[in-house]
Amino acid sequence: MDNPKFKELYEYLANEELKHLGYLEKYRDAKELPVVSTKVPSGQSFTPEFDTARTKGGEITLGDAGILLAAMRHERKSEDFYSALAKRAEDDEQRNFFEMLSRYERVHYELIDGYLENITSFRMQT
């Protein structure tokens, strides 16, 4: 990654997905639903600040946009997956857990969508 703000975003999202994996593994192994914090670390910002020298002619490259679109697709599919699990949940605790994961994925989707909007002055209709 040449653009430090993209790198920051991707590292954040990767760490979030690792947390989700941990939550699911804990539930699988111990049948225990974890207590989850939704706090954003202080000083964490995902407002894109683009250095036009790092882009082609001051514009986002097709490769960067493609990565963001693929990431949005992944987040949407994950949101739908967790929503489906919530509907199939056997009790309120399970349902709340999967609904929470679904909401996380929605937030990630909107975060990435905000990057695309900022970069391209285009907002996908969802």
Image: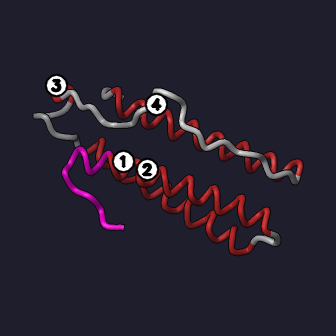
113 left or right of 98 in image: left
Q: Tag on residue 68? A: 1
Q: CA distance from mark 3 to mark 4?
A: 24 Å
Q: Which residue type does callout 4 highlight?
A: Gln
Q: Mark 1 Cα within 10 Å, few/some/many (few <14, many 20+)?
A: some
21 left or right of 3 in image: right
User: Residue drawn 78% across and 68% down?
Assistant: 92
Q: Earlier in the sequence, mark 1 or mark 4?
A: 4
Disc 3 to disc 1: CB gap under 8 Å:
no
Asked whether 56 or 45 is in front, the reply is 45
Query: Which residue is the site of mark 4?
Result: 44
- Single out the mark in the foreground, 3 or 4: 4
Q: Which residue type does callout 3 highlight?
A: Ala
Q: CA distance from mark 3 to mark 1?
A: 20 Å
Q: CA distance from mark 2 to mark 4?
A: 20 Å
Q: Quadrant of the C terminus?
A: bottom left
Q: Which residue type does callout 2 highlight?
A: Ala
Q: Mark 4 Cα within 10 Å, few/some/many (few <14, many 20+)?
A: few
The vertical placement of 6 against 104, above or below, is above
Query: What kind of element bears circle 1?
Result: helix
The vertical placement of 63 against 106, above or below, is above
Q: Which residues are magenta?
A: 115-126
Q: Quadrant of residue 125?
A: bottom left
Q: Which residue type does callout 1 highlight?
A: Leu
Q: Is residue 122 magenta?
A: yes
Q: Tag on residue 71? A: 2
42 left or right of 88 in image: left
Q: CA distance from mark 2 to mark 1?
A: 5 Å
How far from the left and from the top, in percent, is residue 124?
Answer: 29, 62
Query: What kind of element bears circle 3?
Result: helix
Query: Which residue is the site of mark 3?
Result: 53
